[in-house]
C-alpha cells in the first residue's frame, strides 16, 4: 500500500458491469435504467410474516402496533464502527430534537435504532428509543421495511430500508457521489477557505471528490464541512413530508431531474442542496 499511496483516494472493491463501469459505488446507478426497462424490481426484499410477527411481539410493550404510522430514525454516532474516515459522518443528536418533535406533532411515532453507546434522549410521548435495548434482528428488519420513511445517516440501516422500497431521508450526507432513487438527500456543504462559499456539484466533480469523505483530504484542500443546524434539519423533515406527498420540493426536483442524473443523483435533493446545482 505504501508504494501506491500516491494514488489515494481509491476504492479497491469492484464489480463487473460492462467494459466501462467499475466502481462498486456506481452499481445501482449503472444498472437502474436496465432494471426498469427489463421489468425487474430494483427493490428486491419482501418482509416475511414470521419476521413481522416476531418484531411486533417485541415492539408492542414499547407502544408500537402494526397499524401505527412511524418513522425509523438512525443517526450515526461514535461507538460502533469508528475510524478517522467516519468523523464527518457522525452527527450531534441535539440538532435533531426539534425535527423529532415536529414529526411527533404530525401524528407519527419515531422509532430510534442504533447502538448502546449513542447519546440518550429525554423521554417524550411518541418517541420509542431502542438504542439502549437489546433486541432481536427481526426488529430492525421490520422497522426498516414498514416505516413511512427512513430518516438518518447514509450508512447501515439505510440500505435495508432502501431495498424494501421505503423512502429514505439522508441527513448530512457525505460523499457527494451517486445517490440511489426514492428519497431526499441533504449534502454537507464544503466551504472553501479562500472564498467562504460552498463547492457546487460541478466543482465537486471536477475536483474528483464525489466519493470522498476522508477528513484528511478535505483538510488538505482547505475545505470545511458546514453541518446542518437544528433549523436546517427541521426544514429538511418538512420537505421530506412534502416530497413524498408530491408537493413543491418534489416538483422542483422533477424540473431538474435530467441535470441531477448527470451527476448520478437518482433521488431528490433538499432545497439547500439544490442550490449547489449550477
Image (cartoon, rainbow, N blue to C red):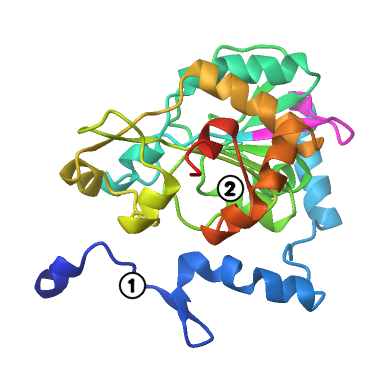
Residue 198 sits above or below residue 95 on the image: below
Horizontal arrangement in the rendering, residue 27 relative to residue 189 (left or right): right
Residue reaching furthest to the left: 3
Q: Nearer the viewer, residue 196 or 40?
A: 196
Which quarter of the figure has residue 77? top left
Q: Is residue 171 visible?
A: no
Horizontal arrangement in the rendering, residue 219 relative to residue 225 (left or right): left
**Which residue is rendered at x = 48% and y = 23% of the image?**
93
Tell me if label 1 and label 2 are in contact, CB under 8 Å: no
**Magenta stretch: includes residue 68:** yes
The mark total stands at: 2
Q: Quadrant of the N terminus?
A: bottom left
Horizontal arrangement in the rendering, residue 26 relative to residue 225 (left or right): right
How crowded pointer 2 is (Cα within 10 Å; few <14, some 14-19, many 20+) is rated as many
At numbered mark 2, what does the secondary structure look like: helix, strand or loop? helix
- In the image, which is nearer the foreground, mark 1 or mark 2? 1
The boundaries of the magenta stretch are 61-72
Give the residue number, with chain letter if any, for mark 1: 12
Horizontal arrangement in the rendering, residue 271 relative to residue 81 (left or right): right
Residue reaching furthest to the front: 278
Which quarter of the figure has residue 253? top right
Question: Residue 214 got which mark?
Answer: none
**Lower sequence index among marks 1 and 2:** 1
- Measured as percent of width and height from the top left, residue 71 is found at 71, 32
- Measured as percent of width and height from the top left, residue 205 is found at 38, 56
Alpha carbon distance from label 1 to label 2: 23 Å
Give the residue number, with chain letter if any, for mark 2: 157
**Magenta stretch: includes residue 69:** yes
Residue 120 sits above or below residue 219 on the image: above
Which quarter of the figure has residue 234? top right
- Measured as percent of width and height from the top left, residue 79 is found at 37, 37
**Which residue is rendered at x = 59% and y = 35% of the image?**
270
Amino acid at each position: 500500500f505504501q508504494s501506491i499511496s500516491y494514488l489515494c483516494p481509491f476504492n479497491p472493491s469492484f464489480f463487473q458491469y460492462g467494459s466501462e463501469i467499475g466502481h462498486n459505488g456506481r452499481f445501482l446507478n449503472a444498472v437502474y435504467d436496465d432494471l426498469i426497462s427489463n421489468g425487474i424490481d430494483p427493490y428486491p426484499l419482501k418482509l416475511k410474516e414470521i419476521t413481522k410477527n416476531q418484531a411486533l411481539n417485541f415492539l408492542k410493550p414499547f407502544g408500537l402496533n402494526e397499524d401505527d404510522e412511524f418513522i425509523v430514525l438512525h443517526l450515526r454516532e461514535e461507538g460502533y464502527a469508528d475510524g478517522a474516515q467516519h468523523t464527518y459522518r457522525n452527527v450531534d443528536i441535539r440538532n435533531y430534537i426539534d425535527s423529532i418533535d415536529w414529526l411527533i406533532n404530525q401524528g407519527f411515532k419515531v422509532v430510534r435504532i442504533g447502538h448502546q453507546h449513542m447519546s440518550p434522549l429525554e423521554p417524550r410521548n411518541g418517541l420509542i428509543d431502542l438504542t439502549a435495548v437489546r433486541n432481536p434482528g427481526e426488529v430492525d428488519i421490520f422497522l426498516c421495511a414498514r416505516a413511512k420513511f427512513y430518516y438518518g445517516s447514509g450508512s447501515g440501516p439505510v440500505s435495508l430500508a432502501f431495498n424494501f422500497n421505503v423512502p429514505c431521508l439522508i441527513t448530512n450526507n457525505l460523499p457527494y457521489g451517486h445517490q440511489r432513487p426514492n428519497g431526499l438527500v441533504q449534502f454537507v456543504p464544503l466551504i472553501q477557505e479562500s472564498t467562504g462559499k460552498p463547492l457546487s456539484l460541478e466543482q465537486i466533480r471536477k475536483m474528483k471528490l464525489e466519493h470522498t469523505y476522508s477528513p484528511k483530504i478535505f483538510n488538505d484542500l482547505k475545505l470545511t464541512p458546514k453541518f446542518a443546524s437544528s433549523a436546517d434539519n427541521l426544514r429538511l423533515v418538512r420537505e421530506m413530508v412534502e416530497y413524498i406527498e408530491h408537493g413543491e420540493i418534489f416538483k422542483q426536483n422533477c424540473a431538474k431531474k435530467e441535470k441531477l442524473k448527470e451527476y448520478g443523483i437518482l433521488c431528490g435533493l433538499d432545497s439547500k442542496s439544490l442550490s449547489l446545482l449550477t
